[in-house]
Image (spheres, rainbow, N blue to C red):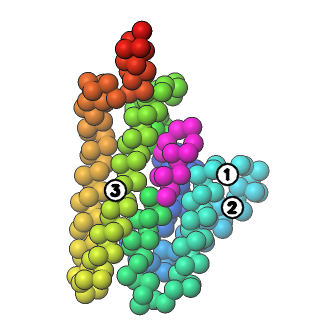
Amino acid sequence: MKSVKRWFQFLYHNFAPVLVFVAANRWWSYKIAVGVALTFTFFEIIRHRYQNKNMTSFFKISAAMAVVLGVLDLLIQDALFFKFEASLSNLVMAIFFGISLRGEKSLIQQFAEEQGRTSSEPSEDKNFFFRLLTMIWVAYFVMKAGLYLWINFNFEIADASLMRMFIGNVSFGVMIFLSMGLAKPLWRILERFRIFPSMRESYIGSNGS
């Protein structure tokens, strides 16, 4: 129970604006989702300043993305923007995950450590493994963005919405299962083929001696 609480606290403190946007967009329209996310972000910034709390880097990034989505919504006409909004949302998530690859720990690794699924002790092999998982998520969001764009330009609005909802829910569930259920088998495969950095270095060293 404590791990679940820590996980939700981690999500809230780092990714609340994006999560609010995604949730609102799932239940209401894109315009409402943008408005809700911007309003939430505005009051969260005020709360942080009032309580003299520092905002995390990921919170700042997610807040900036909410603002960008709001600006694009104002600049692009509704009829055209509908065809792009689902793809744009997925590209935003891809960028969000991708940016974390520039940091010390990737997004998936931070999730795993907050949930207690792995230790927080530094490890080159562990960093490599979670960066690989994060890159898989980036590829997933990019491919889904492309698929949604194709659907929106080839089907009527009602049909496109139903197809996106079905594909989005099913594919997201599959990705969660693969990330959590097949992580250990993937780790063993990487070990077997000596793909981890420490194994490559030892292999090169043994051949060079």
Q: Earlier in the sequence, mark 2 or mark 1?
A: 2
Residue bearing mark 3: 140
Residue bearing mark 1: 55
Q: Earlier in the sequence, mark 1 or mark 3?
A: 1
Residues at marks 2 and 1, CA–CA distance in whole angstroms: 8 Å
Residues at marks 2 and 3, CA–CA distance in whole angstroms: 31 Å
Q: Position of residue 170 (x, y in %)?
A: 23, 60
Callout 2–callout 1 Cβ contact below 8 Å: yes
Front residue of 18 and 199:
199
Q: Position of residue 1 (x, y in %)?
A: 41, 37
Residues at marks 1 and 3, CA–CA distance in whole angstroms: 28 Å
Tell me the mark number nearer the camera, choosing from 2 and 3. Answer: 3
The amino acid type, in three-letter code, at marker 2 is Ile
Residue bearing mark 2: 45
Label 2 environment density (alpha carbons within 10 Å; few <14, some 14–19, many ≥20): some
The amino acid type, in three-letter code, at marker 1 is Met
Q: Answer left or right for 130 relative to 53.
A: left
The residue that appears at 32% across and 24% down in the rendered structure is: 194
Quadrant in the rendering for residue 201: top left
Q: Secondary structure at mark 3?
A: helix
Asked if residue 113 can be seen in this view, the reply is yes
The amino acid type, in three-letter code, at marker 3 is Tyr
Q: Which residues are magenta?
A: 95-107
